[in-house]
C-alpha cells in the first residue's frame, strides 16, 4: 500500500519510506491510501477472539501488502504480550485498562509495534543507524525508550519539557542509558514537538543522518493504536451488551482518537466518540465554533494532554475531508479543570473503589456526563495511577500501590542532556553524534 501526505504536496511513499521518514517532505502526516473495511464475518465472531488474534486481522488489513504475514504477526504478538482488560466501573461504563504493559501506559502498544517494525526494515535494508526523535509530554517518552531499548541500529532521542513531567515518568526514560538519550528542554511540550518537526525539514541533518519520529505523527505508532478499540468492542459484546457503543478518549496530540476513527472507518460499530480534554481544549473549541486555533499549552495535572497544537488534528481533518459538520456527527467533546479532574478521581474512588489516573479521570467524567439512554461506553484508562502518586493520593485520599517494575525505575540514576528550546542548539547536539 502507498501512503500519502495530509498536505498532499509530495509523492506517495511505501510503508517503509513512511516509517523511516516519520514526517513527509512537505511536513504533512502520512496516511494509508486506502483504509479497508473488514468483512462482516469478522465482526460476527469478534467476541470469541483474543486481542492478539484481533490485532493480527486488523494488521493484515493495514500492513499486509508490505510485510510478510509471518513477520507481521510475530511483530503484533510480540508487541501485545500483556493483558488489556475491560473493567465495568459503573453500570454501562467500562474502563479499558491500557496500563499493563512494560511502562504502565497505553503507548506501549504503538511504541513496541513501531520498534519491531522499524527494526525489521533496518535489517532488511542493511541500514547502519536510524535516529529516532520523540517529543514527550509524559508517557510517550517512557514507552518509546523502553520499546526501542537495545534495538540494534537505532538510537533514540527523547525530548521532554523541564519540570513538566512527573518524576515517575521522567525516571522511566532518563535512567536507561545504552541507545537512549534524554534531552531536557527548557520549554513546553509544544517546543519539543516543534524541534522534532524542524529536524525533519533541515537539509543538513537529512543529508548526514537517517531521522524518523516515534511520536504519533509516525504512521507505525498511530495505526496500531486502533487494535484495542476492536478489542474493547469484542469484550463488550462478550459481556452481553448489544446496544450502541460509545468510546471516550483522553486527548492531547490526538493520535489515539485518530486511530479510533480509523477503526470506525474499517467498519468497527462505534456509534460515536467523545474527545476529553483538560484545560488545553483547542479541539473542543473547534467542535463548538468550526475554527481551529492552536495556542500555547498550559500546565495541568493531566500533563500528557498538555498540548496546544495537536499534530493529529491534520489526520482527523483528512479522514473527514475537512468537513466540520461530518466531524461533529461522529465526535463530541468535553473539557475539565484540575479541580474537576480531582473531583472525578475522588468521586469514583468513594463510590466504587476504582482508582483513576488524571487522564482517565477526564475520559471517565466526559463519558459519564455524555452517555445517552440505551448506550454503553468505554473510556481509555491510559496510564497506571501510580505514575502520578501525589495527584492521585491527594484526590483519592488513599495510598497508591506502586507496581514492582515502576519501583525499579525509581531506583535508577537520572541522566539527561539539558538545553534551551532553540533549534540551533538541538541541531548541534544531533550533529555532534552523527
Image (cartoon, rainbow, N blue to C red):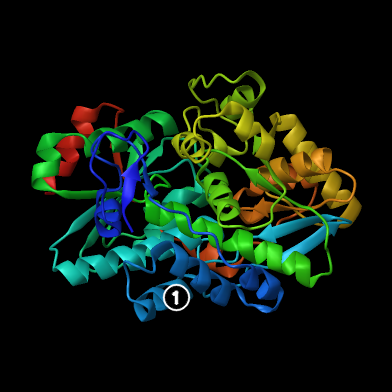
Q: Badge 1, how many Cα within 10 Å: few under 14, some, many 20+?
A: some
Front residue of this view, candidates 336 and 45: 45
Give left or right: position of 7 versus 370.
Answer: left
Instruction: Please say if 243 is above or below 250.
Output: below
Q: Provide residue 151's location: percent of width, then percent of height.
A: 28, 68
Q: Secondary structure at mark 1?
A: helix
Quadrant for the N terminus in the image? bottom left
The one of 84 and 32 positioned closer to us in this rendering: 32
**Residue 354, image x, y percentages:** 80, 57
Q: Can residue 151 be seen from the camera position used here?
A: no
| Residue at the image point whose x is 70% and y is 35% from the top | 332
- Mark 1 highlights which residue? 78
Q: Residue at x 54, y 25 (%)?
A: 298
Instruction: Decide if residue 31 is in sight here.
Output: yes
Residue 176 image-quadrant placement: bottom left
Of residue 67 and residue 213, the one placed in the foreground of this image is 67
The residue located at (52%, 75%) in the rendering is 81
- Residue 134, placed above or below residue 180: above
Between 240 and 355, the residue placed more toward the observer is: 240
Amino acid at each position: 500500500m502507498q501512503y500519502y501526505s495530509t498536505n498532499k504536496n509530495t509523492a506517495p511513499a511505501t510503508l517503509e519510506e513512511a516509517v523511516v521518514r516519520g514526517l513527509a517532505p512537505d511536513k504533512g502526516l502520512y496516511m494509508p491510501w486506502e483504509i479497508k473495511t473488514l468483512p462482516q464475518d469478522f465482526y460476527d465472531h469478534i467476541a470469541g477472539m483474543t486481542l492478539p488474534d484481533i490485532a493480527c486481522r486488523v494488521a493484515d488489513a493495514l500492513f499486509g501488502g508490505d510485510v510478510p504475514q509471518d513477520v507481521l504477526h510475530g511483530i503484533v504478538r510480540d508487541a501485545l504480550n500483556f493483558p488489556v482488560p475491560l473493567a465495568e466501573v459503573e453500570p454501562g461504563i467500562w474502563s479499558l485498562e491500557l496500563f499493563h504493559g512494560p511502562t504502565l501506559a497505553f503507548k506501549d502498544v504503538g511504541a513496541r509495534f513501531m520498534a519491531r517494525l522499524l527494526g525489521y526494515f533496518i535489517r532488511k535494508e542493511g541500514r547502519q543507524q536510524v535516529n529516532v526523535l520523540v517529543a514527550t509530554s509524559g508517557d510517550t517518552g517512557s514507552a518509546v525508550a523502553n520499546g526501542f531499548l537495545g534495538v540494534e541500529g537505532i538510537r533514540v532521542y527523547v525530548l521532554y519539557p523541564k519540570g513538566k513531567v512527573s518524576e515517575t515518568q521522567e525516571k522511566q526514560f532518563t535512567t536507561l542509558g545504552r541507545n537512549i538519550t534524554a534531552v531536557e528542554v527548557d520549554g513546553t511540550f509544544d517546543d519539543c514537538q516543534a524541534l522534532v518537526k524542524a529536524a525533519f525539514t533541515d537539509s543538513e541533518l537529512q543529508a548526514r543522518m537517517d531521522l524518523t519520529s516515534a511520536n504519533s505523527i509516525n504512521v507505525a505508532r498511530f495505526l496500531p493504536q486502533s487494535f484495542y478499540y476492536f478489542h474493547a468492542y469484542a469484550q463488550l459484546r462478550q459481556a452481553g451488551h448489544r446496544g450502541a457503543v460509545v468510546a471516550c478518549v483522553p486527548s492531547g496530540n490526538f493520535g489515539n482518537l485518530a486511530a479510533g476513527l480509523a477503526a470506525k472507518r474499517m467498519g468497527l460499530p462505534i456509534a460515536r466518540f467523545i474527545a476529553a480534554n483538560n484545560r488545553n481544549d483547542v479541539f473542543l473549541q473547534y467542535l463548538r465554533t468550526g475554527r481551529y486555533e492552536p495556542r500555547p499549552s498550559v500546565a495541568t495535572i493531566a500533563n500528557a494532554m498538555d498540548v496546544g497544537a495537536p499534530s493529529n488534528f491534520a489526520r482527523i481533518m483528512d479522514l473527514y475531508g475537512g468537513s466540520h459538520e461530518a466531524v461533529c456527527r461522529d465526535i463530541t467533546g468535553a473539557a475539565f479543570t484540575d479541580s474537576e479532574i480531582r473531583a472525578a478521581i475522588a468521586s469514583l474512588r468513594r463510590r466504587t473503589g476504582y482508582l483513576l489516573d488524571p487522564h482517565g479521570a477526564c475520559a471517565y467524567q466526559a463519558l459519564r456526563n455524555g452517555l445517552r439512554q440505551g448506550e454503553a461506553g468505554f473510556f481509555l484508562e491510559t496510564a497506571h495511577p501510580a505514575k502520578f502518586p501525589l495527584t492521585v493520593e491527594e484526590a483519592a485520599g488513599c495510598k497508591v500501590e506502586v507496581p514492582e517494575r515502576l519501583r525499579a525505575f525509581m531506583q535508577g540514576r537520572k541522566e539527561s542532556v539539558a538545553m534551551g528550546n532553540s533549534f540551533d542548539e538541538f541541531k548541534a547536539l544531533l550533529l555532534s553524534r552523527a
